[in-house]
Image (cartoon, rainbow, N blue to C red):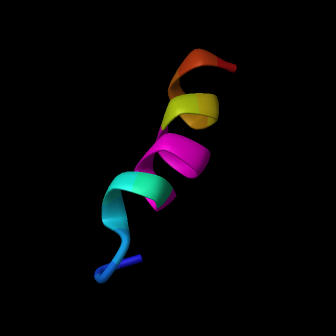
Amino acid sequence: NAHNFPLDLAAVEAPAITG
């Protein structure tokens, strides 16, 4: 999310890209 985008990015973007 916006306020904790690094965590959201790591939890959402990483699996979305890697998997």
7 and 13: which one is in front?
7
Snapshot quadrant of residue 6: bottom left
Q: Is residue 12 magenta?
A: yes
> Which residue shows up at 52% across the image and 31% down it?
14
Q: Is residue 2 left or right of residue 18?
A: left
What is the magenta segment's predominant secondary structure?
helix
- Please state the horizontal and vertical placement of residue 19, each as a whole percent of the image: 69, 20
Relative to 15, say whether 9 is above or below: below
Q: Residue lying at the far right in this picture: please name it.
A: 19
Q: Residue placed farthest to the top in the image?
A: 18
In this rendering, position of residue 11 left or right of residue 3: right
Which range of residues does the magenta coloring cover?
Answer: 8-13
Residue 2 lies in the magenta stretch: no
Residue 15 point in image, percent of width and height: 64, 31
User: Which of the two residues, 16 or 4, is positioned nearer the viewer here?
Assistant: 4
Please tell me how many numbered marks the rendered image carries. Answer: 0
Q: Is residue 4 left or right of residue 10?
A: left
Q: Is residue 18 above or below residue 16?
A: above
Classify the position of the N terminus by image quarter.
bottom left
**Whole-percent x and y of residue 7?**
46, 56
Q: Residue at x 60, y 47 (%)?
A: 11
Place of residue 10 in the rendered image (x, y in percent of width and height, measured from the top left): 48, 42
Residue plotted at (30% across, 80% down): 2
What residue lies at 57% left-to-right and 49% top-to-bottom?
12
* In the depicted structure, whether residue 8 falls above or below residue 2: above
